[in-house]
Amino acid sequence: MTEMTDGVLHTLFRTEQGGHEQVVLCQDRATGLKAVIAIHSTALGPALGGTRFHAYASDEEAVLDALNLSRGMSYKNALAGLDLGGGKAVIIGDPDVLKSEELLEAYGRFVESLGGRYVTACDVGTYVADMDVVARETRWATGRSPENGGAGDSSVLTAFGVFQGMRASAQHLWGDPTLRGRKVGVAGVGKVGHYLVEHLLEDGAEVVITDVREESVRRILDKHPGKVTAVTDTDALIRTEGLDIYAPCALGGALNDDTVPALTATIVCGAANNQLAHPGIEKDLSDRGILYAPDYVVNAGGVIQVADELRGFDFDRCKAKATKIFDTTLEIFARAKADGIPPAAAADRIAEQRMADGRATRAV
């Protein structure tokens, strides 16, 4: 057995992070498509989760990312109050080089072949226009453009939900939900991060940003001259003196053995998925007195938006539901305090109970 196969099977079958129902490996040689569709749970309904298009260092890394992300979607959808399970897909390769309409159409055919068990949407490397192309071949593509019956850019409500999570964190820690006068560091100001910056500035926060893409930083600095500060990289951001809140809004693993000891912020609340690099990091944060708002709770605004396409999209209805992220976050903090556990563990318990209830209901 190869090292890659052993690693994937270990995650799939033999660890707490596993428990997946189905993993599909997809290949279309004509277009260069190599993709992984991971369905973690359909206990609450069809598995909904985006498609990530990324140049992974290895095929194993891509498969493991799909497994981790799909599991996170099960928990996210459960805590968002959606009657949907969790899934995720990754397309392997550099989207700037490999992406084509033919490849996206081929991917859409694989999604369609699952008969509605998996519903896809946008993620890192895929956009509304891409979902319009995927939808040519499948009924199960959300995050489409309004012109094609969709909700448009889900980043809008993702950022709004993260902002609600920040407000709840401030309420819990400081007794006031406003961020006025607080210094907030945002790592990653692309699809979601730049919308989050707008909410923070409107609320009177002092904002510090960084991004690996210079053009993303420049867009914000040009739009808000003198109101936003930029630093060179994430390492500089997390060490910024006087930082109140750190918002990881890029790729996962932002909270690890190197970054947690260096954090100056007292709250971590951001849009990135899978922020905890490994089990135990949530306790390290708690031991340092850092309040962690679980990522899959606060970044659920986007999935709330794309899920609404399945019933006929209404933005006001979605925004009202995303506003409840504030209450859900406070509920998790209260459960964590009552049970004497970190917020991430409390969130897991609440989500797992809802999924268990869903399985029990289906078994009747």
Image (cartoon, grey):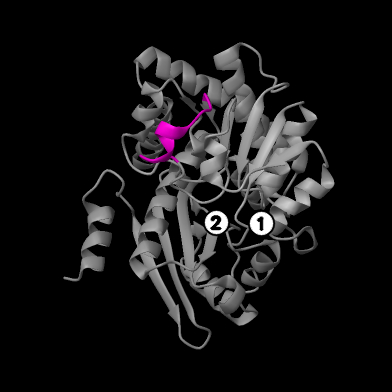
Q: Which mark is residue 186?
A: none
Name the residue carrying label 2.
Answer: 50
In the image, residue 230 lies at what x, y percent? 68, 43
Name the residue carrying label 1.
Answer: 143
Q: Are marks 2 and 1 in contact (CB under 8 Å)?
A: yes
Residue at 39%, 51% (x, y): give it.
68
In the image, residue 46 lies at what x, y percent? 49, 52
Q: Which residues are magenta?
A: 255-266
Q: Is residue 324 visible?
A: no
Instruction: Tell whether 308 sits left or right of 110.
Output: right
Q: Among all residues in the image, which is located at the extreme bottom?
A: 30
Image quadrant occupied by the C terminus? top left
Instruction: Tell whether 4 sits left or right of 361.
Output: left
Position above or below: 156 against 53: above
Amino acid under disc 2? Gly
Q: Is residue 344 magenta?
A: no
Residue at 58%, 37% (x, y): give it.
247
Circle 2 SS class = loop
Position above or below: 59 against 98: above
In the image, residue 210 lies at what x, y percent? 63, 46
Magenta region, main secondary structure: loop
Amino acid under disc 1? Gly
Residue at 41%, 58% (x, y): give it.
66
Residue at 65%, 42% (x, y): give it.
209
Q: Is residue 194 visible?
A: yes
Position above or below: 300 against 213: above
Instruction: Tell whether 185 sits left or right of 347.
Output: right
In the image, residue 318 lies at what x, y percent? 70, 39
Image quadrant occupied by the N terminus? bottom left
- Count neighbours of disc 1 (C-alpha within 10 A) and say few if under 14, some if 14 to 19, many if 20 or more: many
Q: Quadrant of residue 12?
A: bottom left
Name the one closer to the observer, 114 or 224: 224
